[in-house]
Image: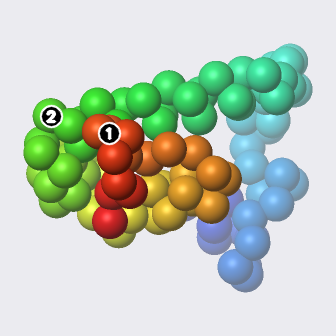
Amino acid sequence: MERAALLSRGEIVLPEHLPARILTTTEGMAPVEPVEVQRLEEIEREAILKALRKNNLNRTETAKELAISRRALTYKLQRMREQGLPVDPTSDQPVS
């Protein structure tokens, strides 16, 4: 990545800046199916809610347990709310 960043001479790293061995490795990869992405988001949501319950809705401790920043956790919860997903582990009121 450092090499690619140096070769790019700008803020954007393009495929031509990557070593050939990286490009040939990714060519044979199958694209990710939307169903797989949805399942991954569901797993993430379940992990977040489980960790919130375990930590008594303490966002700081939940973020530490999930190895993400508290800010990232807040954004994830906000995104879930915007999608209309229940983010309250107890189902009585939203987690804030």
Q: Residue at x 81, y 35 (%)?
A: 23
Looking at the image, tell me whether mark 1 or mark 2 is earlier in sequence order: 2
Q: Quadrant of residue 12?
A: bottom right
**Quadrant of the snapshot with the C terminus:** bottom left
**Quadrant of the snapshot with the N terminus:** bottom right
Which residue is farthest bottom? 10
Q: Is residue 56 left or right of residue 35?
A: left
Label 1 or label 2, whichever lies nearer to me, is 1
Residue 88, position as x, y percentages in the image: 37, 46
Return the residue at label 1.
89
Q: Residue at x 12, y 42 (%)?
A: 55
Counting the numbered discs, the total is: 2
Q: Residue at x 34, y 46 (%)?
A: 92
> Mark 1: which amino acid?
Pro
The disc placed on residue 54 is 2
Residue 81, position as x, y percentages in the image: 55, 57
Q: Residue at x 45, y 56 (%)?
A: 77
> Mark 2: which amino acid?
Lys
